[in-house]
Amino acid sequence: MYYILDNDKKIVKATDKEYTEFFKNPDARRVALDEINGSRISTVFLGLDHRFDEKGPPILFETMVFGGPLDQEQERCCTWDDAEMMHTMMVERVRNA
């Protein structure tokens, strides 16, 4: 199952062709990007469900840290709003690390 975001950042089921077109624009899937204390914190829309047990809503967003003491830390969630909050929380973790 493929997913894309509409203009209001709402999740929409998509065909493989729609998914491919959507992902040609990396800015369309970026939630946030920050650089703090030598670490880069990136939160993006994945477009593929990362909930592997199939119980619950699709997990479609990921925050990941590159560099610094929390290198490779990651969190995942289901909605754009949760992704923004998740990003903010990870930024705070990096600041405090």
Image (spheres, rainbow, N blue to C red):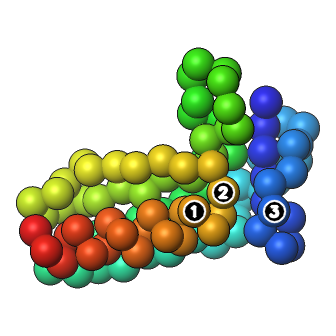
In this rendered view, identify the residue nearer to me: 28 or 8: 8
Q: Who's the residue at 61% across and 41% down the image?
A: 59
Q: Which mark is residue 10?
A: 3
Tell me the element at label 1.
Answer: helix
Q: Given this view, does label 3 or label 1 mark the residue nearer the observer?
A: 1
Tell me the element at label 2.
Answer: loop
- Residue 30, quarter of the rendered image: bottom right
- Residue 37, quarter of the rendered image: bottom left
Placement of the C terminus among the 4 image quadrants: bottom left
The residue carrying mark 2 is: 79
Position of residue 71 relative to residue 49, above or below, is below
In this rendered view, identify the residue nearer to me: 41 or 24: 41
Could you classify mark 1 by the number of other residues whose Cα lies within 10 Å: few (under 14), some (14-19), or many (20 or more)? few
The amino acid at mark 1 is Asp
Q: Which mark is residue 82?
A: 1
Placement of the N terminus among the 4 image quadrants: top right
The amino acid at mark 2 is Thr
- Residue 25, quarter of the rendered image: bottom right
Residue 30 visible in image: no
